[in-house]
Each structure stands twice: as structure tokens, then as C-alpha cells.
Amino acid sequence: MALFELLMRQETSLLINLAAILVILYALFLALTLRSRVPAGMVGRWWTTLTLLVVLFAVGFLASPFLWDLPPANQQLVVALVFLFGALYVVLTIRILHDVIRELGQD
């Protein structure tokens, strides 16, 4: 019974990974297609950095199904890095919104 539960957990994890890969690839598509509409200057610079983070996440998400074979210490390091870059992504997103709101307020 324990083996069946382990296999079900791994199958569920794989499905979640595949869903995450599809979502991040869609986000990358959006980031790249919106790039031409993002004004230059501060917002444009932040947008480039944000897009690079999306690329980093996409590469990581594509590699995620292969990380299960790593030792637990390495898996924990990968998770910690995902948390760190996720936090940076959130900060950059808020900075972009802050800059856009500030620029919209300047009439």
C-alpha cells in the first residue's frame, strides 16, 4: 500500500509540475509579447529584469521533474533558491506597479 501511495504522490507532483510549466511558458509568452508596448525608462528596465526572472523560472520549471533524483539536501537548496527568486519577482512586480502608478499620476 505504501508503494501505491508513493506512486500516486509522484504522479500528482508530476501533474502539478506540468501545469506549472504550462503556466510559466504562458507568462513568458505574455512578457515577451508585451515588451514592445512597455515604455522605455525605469519601467522598461524593470520589465527586462522581470522577463529575465520569468526565463529563469521557465528553465527551472522545465528541469523540475528531473530534480526528484537529487539528494534531499540539494532538493532543499533548489527549493530555497525558488523561494528567493520568487520573492525577488514579487518585489520587482510591485516596483513596476509603483513606477507605473507614479508615471500615471504625473499629468
Image (cartoon, rainbow, N blue to C red):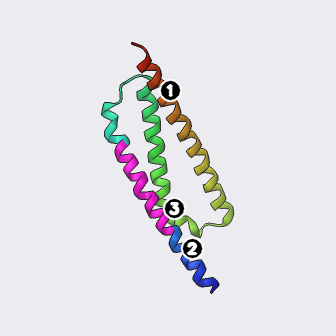
Q: Residues within 10 Å of mark 3 (few under 14, many from 20)?
A: some
Q: Residue at x 56, y 45 (%)?
A: 86
**Residue 29 part of the magenta-drawn span:** yes
Residue extending furthest top? Answer: 107
Marks 2 & 1, CB-CB < 8 Å contact: no
Which circle marks residue 98 in the picture?
1
User: Secondary structure under badge 2?
Assistant: helix
Q: Residue at x 47, y 68 (%)?
A: 15
Which of labels 3 and 1 is toward the front? 1
Mark earlier in primary sequence (3, 1): 3
Q: Position of residue 2 (x, y in %)?
A: 64, 83
Q: Amino acid at mark 1?
A: His
72 relative to 94, above or below: below
Location of residue 34 (image quadrant): top left
Most prominent secondary structure in the magenta stretch?
Answer: helix
Residue 9 is tagged as 2
Q: Which mark is residue 64?
A: 3
Position above or below: 16 against 58: below
Q: Residue at x 47, y 35 (%)?
A: 49
The amino acid sitting under disc 2 is: Arg
User: Dot 1: what SS?
Assistant: helix
Identify whether 38 is placed above or below 89: above
Other residues around mark 2 within 10 Å, as few (<14) / some (14–19) / many (≥20): few
* The residue stretch that appears in magenta: 14-30
